[in-house]
Image: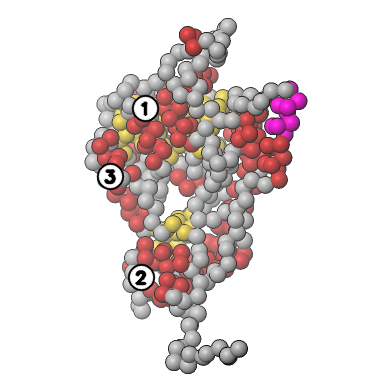
Amino acid sequence: MNPPQINKGIAPVKSDQLASHGGPKTRPTTLPGRFAFGDAELAAVQEVFCYYRERNVDFGYQGHFEEHYCQAFIRYLGVPGYADAVATGIAALFVALAALQLPRGSHVVVSPITDPGTINAIILNGLVPVLMDSMPGSYNAGPEQFRQRLTPETRALVLVHAAGVAAPVDNFLPIARERGIKVLEDCSQSHGARLNGKMVGTFGDIAAFSTMYRKNHATGGCGGVIFTPDEKLYRLVRACADRGKAFWQPGFNEKDPKQFLFPALNLNLDELSCAIGIQTLARLERTNQRRRAFLRTLGEALRERSAVCTPSQMSDDDAPFFFPIFVASGKLSCGVREFAEAIAAEGINVNPHYDYVVSEWPYVRAYLADEFATPNAAACRDASFNLLFNENYGPDEVRDITDAIAKVERYYRKEDSGRGA
């Protein structure tokens, strides 16, 4: 066998060469997986099979495990009320809005940064989204932004608690109550977040949660939950989620469609998913604690090592879903997006540019009340990138993330901007 050839004319790759330029990655190995569904969830699924086999029937929906899941969810929120599990997060939003029975064409003021499901649920209910801006430097909207966007046709507010941080919903309520405006909290990214010690989702008339597999608390691949303190509204939620069935009426026969109230889809969640949800809900507090602990350590390291990046402010009331990191672009010779893309190339899981500013989506413009551009929301997004992480991240990930940021910062930092690492 011939010996390997040595290319003497090629200089060795320096460790500071960016991975995006052909250098070695700071993090060459895979980041920790979340593994949201483990032995407890597997055992829960098996329990569903055993439970229904013992009764010689097949499992379906609106059964034993959904009842237990919904009751556990209510206990977790810590206030009296009613819950219904549905097929997806957008189903939760759609059904919650449908249950409010707003006149078609009503205006619904909505947060400016959110998933398309939030906006689509408004549109598909025959309602008109009215975008409000976010607070300066925040993904979340504030009461002044809400007040500025009220119209004579406003009948509801859909307030998103973004990225695991509670929006100041308590300050929205007096404005809404004075005008008879219904308040729907979109808690899809903020399971377990609190405001003044009270859980998000317990302030407004009704709340919607997504429980798809990436959320801090999940019921499987897809899922959603609706919560309301109002029994009448809960009955409408159940009817809107299950073909208009008036299950609460004496003598109701679900096999007799003549007794159904109105057209509605079947948007129920199944028993297997509810059993999984019972388990992930039971450890939600621990999940959020571990996420906060990681981010606190990361924030301390980042403040020590970076002259460019500033971690988001975080409190013990947060339930972090992703983590915005703000960039002092004036200290760099590149834009924020290029900077973040270079960090991603180092093997770090980030979203370099959060494309969830609603006013920028071409398809939605024809449905909006006007062409309001939400400049605060766009500016906040443009000044940051989002770190994607999970509760299994630890000291090694703190080191590698800050190493990657420091490496990219050294390359792009302007000479007169000061030093980080």
Q: Residue furthest right?
A: 54
Above or below, 116 relative to 56: below
Residue at the location (62% across, 56% down)? 392
Q: CA distance from mark 3 to mark 2?
A: 33 Å
Q: Which residue is mark 1?
A: 125
Q: Which residues are magenta?
A: 47-55
Q: Is residue 376 magenta?
A: no
Circle number at residue 362: 3
Labels 1, 2: front one: 1
Q: Look at 26% across and 40% down and name the residue there.
A: 365
Placement of 242 over or under 43, stated as above or below: above
Decide: is 94 above or below 327: above
Tell whether 97 sits left or right of 85: left
First in sequence, mark 1 or 3: give its number: 1
Please report contact status of discs 1 and 3: CB closer than 8 Å, yes or no. Answer: no
Nearer the N terminus, badge 3 or badge 2? 2
The amino acid type, in three-letter code, at marker 3 is Pro
Q: Which residue is mark 2?
A: 331
Residue type pointed to by label 2: Lys
Residue type at the position of mark 1? Asn
Q: Secondary structure at mark 2?
A: helix
x, y (%) of residue 367?
Answer: 28, 35
Q: From the top left corner, tell me how far across and down residue 135 is, in percent.
A: 36, 46
What residue do we see at 30% from left, 31% from top?
A: 128
Is the magenta region chiefly helix, strand or loop?
A: helix
Q: Secondary structure at mark 3?
A: helix
Numbered label attached to residue 48:
none
Give how far apart the Cα atoms at labels 1 and 3 are: 20 Å
Q: Residues within 10 Å of mark 2 (few under 14, many from 20)?
A: some
The image position of residue 58, as x and y in percent, is 66, 25
